[in-house]
Amino acid sequence: MSPEMLAYPFLFIAIFFESFVLVTLLSKPARAARARTAGTETPSVAIVVPCYNEAATVAGTCETLLALEYPKDRLEIILVDDGSTDATPSAMACFADNPQVRIIRKENGGKHTALNAAIATTGAEIIGCLDADSFVEPNALREIIPCFADPKVAAVTAAMSVHRPKNLLQHMQNAEYIFGITLRHVFASVNGLYVTPGPFSFYRHSTLKEIGDFRHGHQTEDMEMALRIQQKGYKIENAPYARVYTKAPETVFKLVKQRTRWTTGFFRNILGEYRGLVGNRAHGVLGMLVLPSALIAVGSGILIFSMMVFDLVRNTVTALEIRAGIPMSYTLLPHSSIDWFYLPVSVYVLLGASTLLASLSLIVAGKRISKTPGNLALGLISYTFLYGLIAPLWLLRATADVTFGKRRTWR
Amino acid sequence: MSLVTRNVLIALFITAALTGTVAYAVNYLNNARITELGAIEDQLSIDTLSLDTQFSLLEAAPCDTAASSTAFIGKLADLGTRLSYAESQLGIDNPQVIRLKQQYSLLEIRDYLITKQLAEACGTKPVTVLYFYSNAGDCADCDKAGYALSYLHDTYPSLRVYSFDYNLDLGALKTFIAINKVKNTLPAFVVNGKKSYGFTSLEELEKQFPKGALATTTSKL
């Protein structure tokens, strides 16, 4: 059996997954979500900004929150300094006189403790969270609120993309985030979300009181909270027009570190306390499709990357052996003519290309659905050529960490 | 039927349809490759027969036909490259590939014999290489030898290289191997009738050629 044969089941699953996303995108619930308009309801809202050494960005984040189109007497902003050691306190102090802003200072205890400290001090009906390196559009909150119309909805997520991507790596992440917009929009329509990201997710306060505070959640408190919401039988919605922009890691090292944290958090939550959700028919799409697919995606990412590396090494060694002793001027020049006959087409290549093409289409769809501004061309190019090479690095690292029980620091 | 169940069924249908279409497209392309190879072989058969006939017709001045033979060996080499690619795509056990290889080997033998006849009639000294390989996994150095010969052929276009799968089930080839007394120690080379076995380096292979042959082969034909 050729190594390619091993990849066929994964390619089949990937195509099935993307087909399901596409079909559900065109189905009635997703269409209804897209047709939903910004509401006039104005429940009291508190948005918590947990900060640890965010001096460079917290002021900008707070400014965009103050610019939200929402009655000022119904919106409270709580900046929580989680024991920062940089100039975060002085950056926060600039807003001390603003009646909408409240500042809390506490000893460093982790993001979840910062969130809990703020939630404990507010009586707002809706609690929002915004990472201190993220920025929101003025209409974002008005897009979020109507999603809480259904009393079973406990949380609402936004449409997240990268704030001013500069290098190729950030453009790649921007494309990936916009892919996430499509996925979140689609899976929210069938209650299949398992993470409420730090940038601009909102919670019904009464539900939080019922199900409990944020937890450490293996350094992924947002995922743990979302899984707990699902476990308790509530829904997680998505507001595709509520745009939020977040800073993305600018180096491969930082990106791999961030994603290793996310992936180990996913593994430890899913294989630990929330194992019961996986394959559970009672949890519908989340249990039967989304969580199993996410687990399979990690396995297939590692397998296909390993195959690529194996093939590359084997072919390079063979090529070097075969070409030994032949002048370089000959070996470096292509010798086969350009002819359809030599098209390197196989079932493996075509199925892989179909999967990639579907992914790119869903990224474009995400941009159109959310009306996210900016040029996506660089994002699509870098996603096509870089993502498959970089993502396996964090998948492998996270898998090794979970296997050997290694714990890493947040930063 | 719930919305999710319906969507799952539609997605499964799309996946199956796409996979089926891809499999069909690849199969179609492979068949087109086989057809293309067949067409080239047909053309070469006509060329061979034409050359043969010309040779018979112009017995008094057979050397006039030599002009076309360099172009012919180029076509033959191109067919060999395509056949090798088709073999890598379709597998060495593919019956159509085996049939095409048999036809190709016959063409090679035929051209080799005509070349010999022309050389005798015209007094030329072409350098011919008979190269015997195996792709049954029992010849570790065959890939290296094949690449070295490709290099020599590309560098000296008039060098006449004939490659044969030693294990091909073809009566004419078996007879050809028996006449040339080529042992099953591969890779094997017969350079202008002189046999050698194994491949170590390009340098060693070049030593098997007649002195000065590689430098002057282009001008000889």
Image (cartoon, rainbow, N blue to C red):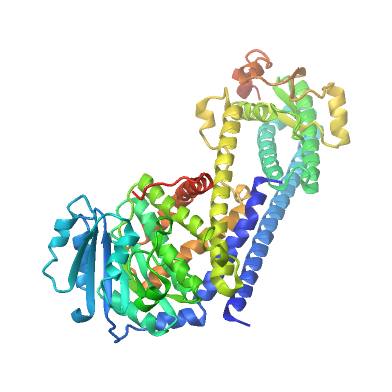
The furthest residue to the bottom:
A40
Residue drawn at x 44%, y 68% is A226
Residue drawn at x 60%, y 58% is A11
In percent of width and height, residue A334 lies at: 54, 37
Residue drawn at x 29%, y 70% is A120
- Which of the pair A145/A162 is nearer the observer? A145
Residue A113, relative to residue B127: is it above or below?
Answer: below
In percent of width and height, residue A284 lies at: 57, 74
Residue A71 visible here: no
Q: How many marks?
A: 0
In percent of width and height, residue A31 lies at: 46, 81
- Which of the pair B107/A194 is nearer the observer? A194
- Which of the pair A371/A240 is nearer the observer? A240
In percent of width and height, residue B7 lies at: 59, 76
Q: Quadrant of residue B116?
A: top right
Residue A216, relative to residue B221: is it above or below?
Answer: below
The furthest residue to the left:
A97
- Which of the pair B189/B172 is nearer the observer? B189
Residue A380, relative to residue B173: is it above or below?
Answer: below
Residue B135 visible here: yes
Residue A359, relative to residue A29: is it above or below?
Answer: above
Q: Quadrant of residue B140?
A: top right
Q: Does residue A261 appear to the left or right of B36 in the view shown?
A: left
